[in-house]
Amino acid sequence: GMKQGEELARGIVRSRCLDVFVDGVCVTKLGTGDYFGEVALVGYSDNKRTADVVATSPLELFELSRADVFAVTQQFPILQGRLQVMAQARLRRANSTPSDSPSNLSPESPDDTAQHGASQGP
């Protein structure tokens, strides 16, 4: 598993399930196609993990380094903006939703995130 406060890994879940814990409390589950690590990618967490991520079964994971993401965002600048919108939305949900809610850190689709990001204030 990946532990809160450690150097960040970023990834996209290819198959199976991960549980996400903040301060020992399970806040969400991630499944196929979900992602994590975007909060640190855009500089909101000093490149440290903000949660523990624990595999609940054997899994396949696409891990992305900061250099990988930087190279892609240089070629496709709109992606950097989308990552920022997704990270801001996740932080906003985490700060506004009670910690016992299982969905406060779950990812949204980019279209849902962009709509929420455009309609909600800071």
Image: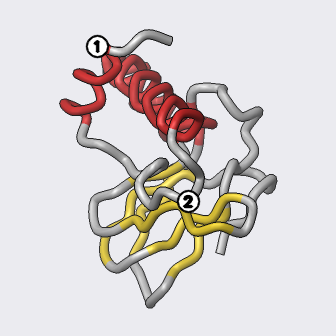
Position of residue 57 relative to residue 26, above or below, is: below
Taking 19 as reference, is 108 left or right? left
Q: Name the amino acid, label 1.
A: Ser
Question: Which residue is the extreme one toward the right?
Answer: 5
**Which residue appears at 76% of the width and 33% of the height?**
46
Q: Which residue is mark 2?
A: 100
Q: CA distance from mark 2 to mark 1?
A: 25 Å
Q: Name the amino acid, label 2.
A: Asp
Q: Which residue is mark 1?
A: 119
- Chain-order first, disc 2 or disc 1: 2
**Of residues 115 and 95, the one drawn nearer to the viewer in this rendering:** 95
- Quadrant for residue 12, please give it: bottom left
Taking 120 as reference, is 92 left or right? right
Quarter of the picture containing the N terminus is bottom right
- The x and y percentages for residue 50 are 69, 48
**Which residue appears at 57% of the width and 68% of the height?**
26
**Which residue appears at 46% of the width and 62% of the height?**
28
